[in-house]
Image (tube, rainbow, N blue to C red):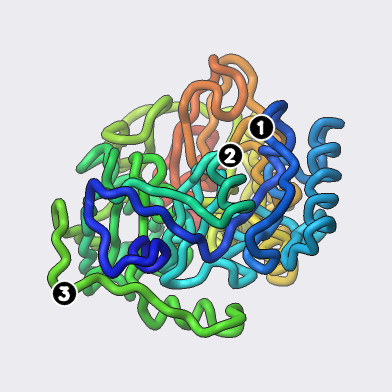
Amino acid sequence: ILARTSGKSVVRPGEVAVCRPDIVIHIDLPMAIEGAWYRPRKVFDRERVAVIFDHAIPSPSIRDASAMAEGRRFAKEFGLKHLFDVGQHGISHVVAAERGLTRPGELLVCADSHTCASGGLNCAGRGAGIPDTLQAITRGVVWYLVTPTVRYEFKGELGPMVSGKDVFFHIAQTWGGHGNTSVEYGGPGLPALAMSDRRTMATMSAEIGAEFAIFDYDELTADYLKGRLDHPATPAHPDADADYLDVRTVDLAQVEPYVILPDSVPRNGVRLSSFGRQIRIDQAFIGSCANGLIEDLRVAAQIVRGHKVAAGVRFIVTPGSQAVYLQALREGLLETLIEAGAVVTNSTCGACFGYHMGVLGPGEVCITASTRNFKGRMGSTEASIYLGSPATVAASALTGVITDPRTVTGARA
């Protein structure tokens, strides 16, 4: 992908690829940061620049309202083909996938650090930062250092109440950080991983420092994209003679639910079967670009159906997009979650980045199916953030302590 978009036949680790992006996505947050946004005098291609409002929607402050007004002005001035305003909004990576902007074999640029989410659909994406994204918007140019790649080969199938989030935690715990490398996911067990699991894992790959993360293209990818793309997919496949930094095998049947302890992700996890601690929680959160999909809400509703959230626990569920919200409504998932005592919020980044709709106070403990757990990520620097799968979060919301989802009634039903 980097070779094609840089006009070369091949690129190798250590080289700098100067690329022409296939799509550039601009979000609201950069326009809300003082000194971060400069009004462009041109865009490189009005059909290949999209604006998606996602981090603070609807606006919780005057600053955010002003940023979105600027985003609308920008989209109108240049006649951009893609503007996802309030009402069509959602987390940018989720909306881009739903609306066919995340395309196999292509290069997607966005300032957000979880742009590697696009790799779940065989699309190369990496958080480019605000200045580089502005350059991509105006000049149609972005550069990347080409890195070596680690390939993960999957075999087997996941057990009950084990998800792609747990597979990622297993990788992070077993092999640690992946700085200055990219990751590739495939193997004979790939068909056993649902598209939602792939999208979660690609998104979370930012938390091990991976540059790019990409899944092999297969029939499941094609099925998901059917009817979403405005032109035929051009998938990227591994070369038969690809030279990997390492090739590692993951037996999906051996993966168990994990919890990641506060403040970091790599090599900071514990299998819940051996956790052995009674960690009381104040908040349980399901959402973010990693786990705000309809499959995540289905799992949560399955576990809490007919039960009540533990006293003193705030259970917050944030769909990843308006489309996810609407589908959950049609399936009755929202009713199930609310009857159990959950709060279902508008579709946005929300509590994940500690900005609105679920900010943590000093001394509070949260179990979250979002992306990050460093100090201050979700609010107070004195709060403790544990990471888990949506199943683990829902189970913990019921018991009031961090809980293996395989031990609760709803998960066994």
Q: Are marks 3 and 1 in contact (CB under 8 Å)?
A: no
Q: CA distance from mark 3 to mark 2?
A: 36 Å
Mark earlier in primary sequence (1, 2): 1
Query: Which residue appears at 54% of the width and 20% of the height?
Result: 383
Question: Where 222 falls versus 377 (above or below)?
Answer: below
Report whether 277 appears left or right of 127. Answer: left
Inspect the image, locate mark 1, and give the three-letter code of the amino acid beneath it. Answer: Ala
* Residue 291 percent coordinates (x, y): 53, 52
Looking at the rendered image, the quarter that the N terminus falls into is bottom left
Please rate how many residues cluster around mark 2, counting C-alpha atoms within 10 Å: few if below 14, some from 14 to 19, many from 20: some
Is residue 120 shown to the viewer in this render?
no
Report whether 56 appears left or right of 49. Answer: right
Question: How many numbered discs sit on the rendered protein?
Answer: 3
Inspect the image, locate mark 3, and give the three-letter code of the amino acid beneath it. Answer: Ala
Question: Where 88 falls versus 398 (above or below)?
Answer: below
Is residue 220 shown to the viewer in this render?
yes
Q: Quadrant of residue 47?
A: bottom right
Check disc 1 and report its element: helix, strand or loop. Answer: loop
Report whether 26 appears left or right of 177. Answer: right
Please rate how many residues cluster around mark 3, counting C-alpha atoms within 10 Å: few if below 14, some from 14 to 19, many from 20: few
Q: Which is nearer the eye, 359 or 80?
A: 80
- Label placed on residue 130: 2
Q: Are marks 1 and 2 in contact (CB under 8 Å)?
A: yes
Question: Where 278 falls versus 403 (above or below)?
Answer: above
Check disc 3 and report its element: helix, strand or loop. Answer: loop
Which residue is labeled 1 in the image? 36
- Label placed on residue 240: 3
Q: Quadrant of residue 354?
A: top right
Mark earlier in primary sequence (3, 2): 2
Foreground: disc 3 or disc 1: 1
Q: Which is nearer the eye, 150 or 399?
A: 150
* Residue 6 percent coordinates (x, y): 39, 61
